[in-house]
């Protein structure tokens, strides 16, 4: 009988110690985050602007936080596949996503009932960069300015052939916003990438293309493309003489692609704070700003409530276009 009592006493003591120690271990792991490698999901294939940006920041996080941040490309379905994996991961800070406009605010809305996540399933950590959009024409085209483009569309109703990079992309939304604000109608032509769209523009099959700046910058600099306007809050240093849509009295045309860090919804606040603090330090590094500028982006510092509101505004822009029937779900 005494042996049984002794065993019960030892077992009860072990349970008590276990219950007391585990929260301390969990707190220690949180305070020391990260203690091992962090998985960084990029919801696109290698080689694009999102991938390049993610690799710049993953390298910087590794230096800042002393653990390897490993980029994993999980492309497909407009970013839905990679984002879905991120939201289903353990909310411990060891799986994050560096994603773009598409998987964060657009693709899940465009997928309709097929989507298995939404903005509410993600924790907004920090904005990293914004990528100016640009409207371009063939340098040999008689359309040399934004006013030329508007005048051509007015005198040739329903004939202007406007290329973009697919349903729901920033360029596509910009075209829809232009049509609505100007009461004009264009022939929208969707492409799977900027390369084919630009080639058709150079070949004379299109009148204009709405794309992201990195995809067109070199051809603008070489004189093959003419930049008519940038979609960004202010002029960009790589195209200082090209006006913004706001300057052109088109402030409604305002969707510029962005990249941001997102995490599973229940990621602990302490982990989020560490990531935000590290992000801010990285964004303050002029060398990082130069590397982002070299690939056509602009670093942007935003986190907390401001960043959450930014995402909600972007989400609402897409929602309103879908509800009005201007932008179609898949």
Image (cartoon, rainbow, N blue to C red):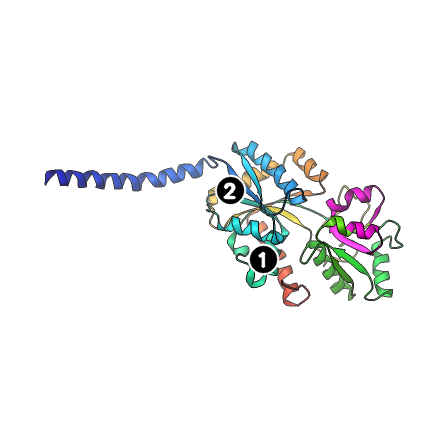
Q: Position of residue 275 (x, y in %)?
A: 53, 40
Earlier along the polypeptide chain: callout 1 or callout 2? Answer: 1
Q: Position of residue 143 (x, y in %)?
A: 87, 55
Q: In which quadrant will I find the C terminus?
A: bottom right
Residue 230: in sight, yes or no? no
Q: Is residue 313 above or below residue 98?
A: below
Q: Is residue 120 above or below residue 35?
A: below
Residue 7: in sight, yes or no? yes
Secondary structure at numbered mark 2: helix
What range is drawn magenta here?
Answer: 198-226
Residue found 23% across the figure and 39% down from its top: 13
Q: Nearer the viewer, residue 131 or 269?
A: 131
Secondary structure at numbered mark 1: helix
Residue found 77% across the figure and 44% down from its top: 217
Side (left or right) of 267 relative to 246 = left
How far apart marks 1 and 2 lie (CA) works out to 27 Å
Is residue 78 located in the magenta-colored stretch of the structure? Answer: no
> Do residues under tags 1 and 2 come within 8 Å of each other at their CB atoms?
no
Q: Residues within 10 Å of mark 2 (few under 14, many from 20)?
A: some
Front position among marks 1 and 2? 1
Q: In which quadrant will I find the N terminus?
A: top left
Determine which residue is flagged by label 2.
Answer: 273
Residue 301, by quadrant, is: top right
Determine which residue is flagged by label 1.
Answer: 108
Q: Position of residue 239 (x, y in %)?
A: 79, 44
Residue 210, by quadrant, is: bottom right
Residue found 62% across the figure and 38% down from its top: 55
Q: Nearer the viewer, residue 126 or 223?
A: 223
Q: Nearer the viewer, residue 140 or 76?
A: 76
Q: Position of residue 307 (x, y in %)?
A: 59, 50
């Amino acid at each position: 009988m005494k042996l049984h009592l002794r065993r019960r006493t030892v077992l009860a003591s072990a349970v008590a110690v276990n219950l007391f120690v585990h929260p301390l271990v969990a707190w220690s792991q949180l305070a020391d985050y990260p203690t091992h490698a962090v998985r960084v999901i990029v919801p696109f294939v290698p080689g694009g602007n999102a991938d390049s940006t993610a690799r710049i920041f993953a390298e910087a996080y590794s230096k800042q936080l002393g653990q390897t941040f490993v980029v994993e490309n999980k492309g497909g379905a407009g970013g839905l596949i990679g984002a879905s994996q991120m939201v289903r991961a353990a909310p411990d800070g060891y799986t994050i996503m560096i994603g773009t406009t598409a998987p964060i605010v657009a693709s899940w809305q465009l997928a309709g009932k097929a989507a298995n996540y939404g903005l509410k399933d993600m924790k907004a950590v920090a904005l990293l960069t914004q990528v100016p959009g640009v409207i371009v024409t063939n340098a040999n085209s008689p359309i040399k300015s934004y006013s030329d483009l508007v005048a051509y569309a007015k005198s040739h109703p329903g004939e202007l052939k406007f290329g973009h990079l697919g349903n729901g992309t920033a360029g596509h939304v910009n075209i829809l916003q232009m049509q609505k604000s100007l009461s004009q109608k264009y022939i929208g032509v969707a492409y799977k990438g900027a390369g084919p769209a630009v080639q058709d523009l150079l070949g004379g099959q299109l009148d204009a293309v709405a794309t992201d700046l990195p995809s067109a910058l070199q051809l603008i600099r070489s004189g093959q493309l003419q930049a008519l306007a940038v979609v960004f809050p202010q002029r960009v240093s790589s195209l200082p003489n090209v006006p913004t849509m706001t300057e052109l009295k088109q402030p409604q045309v305002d969707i510029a692609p962005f990249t941001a860090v997102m995490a599973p919804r229940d990621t602990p606040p302490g982990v989020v704070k560490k990531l935000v603090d590290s992000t801010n330090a990285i964004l303050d590094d002029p060398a990082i700003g130069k590397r982002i500028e070299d690939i056509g982006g602009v670093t942007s510092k935003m986190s907390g409530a401001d960043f959450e509101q930014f995402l909600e505004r972007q989400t609402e822009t897409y929602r309103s276009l879908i509800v009005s029937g201007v932008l179609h779900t898949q």
